[in-house]
């Protein structure tokens, strides 16, 4: 085994593994539905993401096994003289692989990918209850510069 982490765009065949990772934490288990047969909503969402050139749902593989996932969104806007930024969301490492440096490699890849797309900024949001995640993001150089707000529409 080479123990080389490789990155690629996700395929429909990866959905089960992705949803399993999304649901494998204290907050994800409350909002994801990880059954033997996935909800059609996941497939519909995947198809919309895959069809959008400004979205990249990515998986990381270690020796052929999917061990991490994340989604990059490339956002064009008028400020910063018509600049663009990348947003990284749904970052997950398979629980049996956490603490092995995979998350750091994921962010190195995402930062380089955002630069390749001409972005001047990589941003993320994380739930304030994810204290370990907050410390990890800060260790990577992310700074809480803005106050984010959300409103449920349900």
Image (spheres, rainbow, N blue to C red):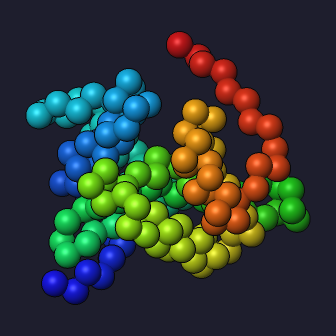
Determine whether, in the image, residue 127 is placed left or right of residue 64: right
Q: Is residue 144 left or right of residue 124?
A: right
Mark yes or no: residue 58 visible. Answer: no
Residue, x 67% and y 58% (percent of image)? 138
Q: Quadrant of residue 64?
A: bottom left
42 lies left or right of 103: left
Identity of the residue drawn at 22% across and 86% down: 2
Q: Residue 69 or 43: which is nearer the viewer?
A: 69
Q: Is residue 104 above or below residue 88?
A: below
Query: Residue pushed farthest bottom?
Result: 2
Residue 9 lies, in percent from the top left, at 35, 65
In the foreground, 53 or 85: 85
Location of the N terminus by quadrant is bottom left
Q: Is residue 121 visible?
A: yes
Quarter holding residue 61: bottom left
Q: Residue at x 58, y 33 (%)?
A: 129
**Picture residue at 23% right of the left edge, 50% below the top:** 17
Q: Which residue is more in the foreground, 122 or 127?
A: 127
Question: How far from the left and from the top, in percent, is residue 86?
Answer: 63, 60
State whether residue 16 is above or below residue 108: above
Percent position (x, y) of residue 124?
Answer: 63, 50
99 shown above or below 43? below
Outermost residue, left side = 36
The residue furthest top is: 154
> Total label count?
0
Q: Camera-side residue: 11 or 24?
A: 24
């Amino acid at each position: 085994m080479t123990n080389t982490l490789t990155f690629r765009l996700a395929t429909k065949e990866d959905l089960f593994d992705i949803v399993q990772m999304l649901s494998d934490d204290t907050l994800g288990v409350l909002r994801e539905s990880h059954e033997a047969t996935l909800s059609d909503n996941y497939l519909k969402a995947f198809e919309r993401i895959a069809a959008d050139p400004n979205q990249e749902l990515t998986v990381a593989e270690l020796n052929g096994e999917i061990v991490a996932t994340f989604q990059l969104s490339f956002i064009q806007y008028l400020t910063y003289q018509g600049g663009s930024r990348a947003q990284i969301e749904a970052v997950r490492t398979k629980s049996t692989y956490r603490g092995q440096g995979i998350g750091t490699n994921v962010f190195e890849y995402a930062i380089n990918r955002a630069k390749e797309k001409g972005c001047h900024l990589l941003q993320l949001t994380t739930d304030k209850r994810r204290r370990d995640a907050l410390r990890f993001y800060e260790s990577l150089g992310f700074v809480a510069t803005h106050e984010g707000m959300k409103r449920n529409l349900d």
